[in-house]
Amino acid sequence: EEQPGKLPGTALAIRLSYFLWNGPPDAELRTLAANGRLLQPTVLRAQTERLLNDPKAKRSFDAFLDYWLDLRKVGDTTPDVVLYPDYYLDDLLVESAVSETRLFFEELIRKNLPARTIIDSDFTMLNNHLAKHYGINGVDGVAMRRVALPPESVRGGLLTHASVLKITANGTTTSPVLRGVWIQERLLGDPPPPPPPGTPAVEPDTRGATTIRQQLDQHRAIRSCAVCHNKIDPPGFALENFDVLGGWRERYRSTAEGAPVKGVGKNGHSFTFRHGPAVDASAVLPTGEQFADIKGLKRLLAANDRQIARNLVQQFLLYATGAPVRFADRAEVDRILQATAPGRFGVRSIIHEIVQSELFRTK
């Protein structure tokens, strides 16, 4: 059994390669490990840069997103055929949505963009399929490319990616609880505790006659539920303008009462869903800060860029070493943040500082 301490050259090469390539080290890395030069900080930094620039790095970025964002679960649900028949007209929509998230993250690393870009950005990666879904004009062809977003756009940042919005919905309804927990866990690094034993679940109204906000208001009347839901629900409410596949909506879709919606889905069948209640995306955070919609929430979250960066550091460290960050590791995490703060916590810089850290170079 290996003893705790500094990683020898070969073990360091293996850890670095699996972190950035999701595969074994190549000949150059093995040679530097064998002659001991990889243990030199300047050589290690140069090799980190080389691995990041190699096309094989995409394998690791994809695997990291599958773990961090649960992107691997994007196909676990399908839109309800009655409420969302129009989504079955585009066979490339979900594939395009996943590509947006993967290419967006690669761009963060390639351009060393600030960690706050995870929350809000003035660009995204689109093709004609996704641009149409988002209501953005002027994007032609199936090739994904970087597209500047107009100032009034609600898009920008992972929160508004169709892939993320699909993962955090069930195909029929959206849940501010699920989405709020996802934000707390995945983006803020502040997961809520599990609900108390015996807590009743919130059963969504699949007909769309009542809103999830109305149902959660009743749920929060239970004292044991209120404390956590006051923290979880507000970020989730901000995403209620996005449906189960990330399409924008002002009103919920309903199979109960409401004005009929004209349109034709796959196989020529007319829509049978109706306009349901209006969406209310406003909320108040536990800090007392208020927002009216997703743009307001993103502005509040992005202002705390150190928290966003800290969570990213911890997620990277867990992926790279297989060990969660402990309380005793906080000083080293703070060192990484201090080193990257002048560049606004650039994502590529964070990776470099992680590789140089004691947490990465020891076992």
Image (cartoon, rainbow, N blue to C red):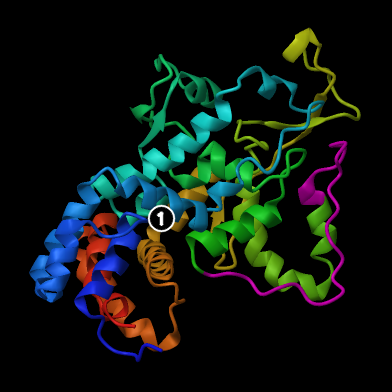
266 to 55, vertically: above or below? above
Query: In terms of secondary structure, what is the magenta stretch mainly?
Result: loop
Q: Position of residue 286 (x, y in %)?
A: 59, 67
Q: Residue at x 38, y 64 (%)?
A: 316
Task: Look at the image and say whether residue 206 sits in the magenta stretch.
Answer: yes
What segment carries the magenta color?
Answer: 190-214
Assign the C terminus to one quadrant of the image. Answer: bottom left
Q: Quadrant of residue 251?
A: top right
Q: Can residue 204 be seen?
A: yes
Q: Quadrant of the N terminus?
A: bottom left
Do we see residue 284 in this rendering?
no
Asked whether 223 or 129 is in front, the reply is: 129
- Tell me what residue is drawn at x 31 percent, y 57 percent: 20
84 w.r.t. 323: above or below: above
Q: Secondary structure at mark 1?
A: helix
* Magenta residue check for 208: yes
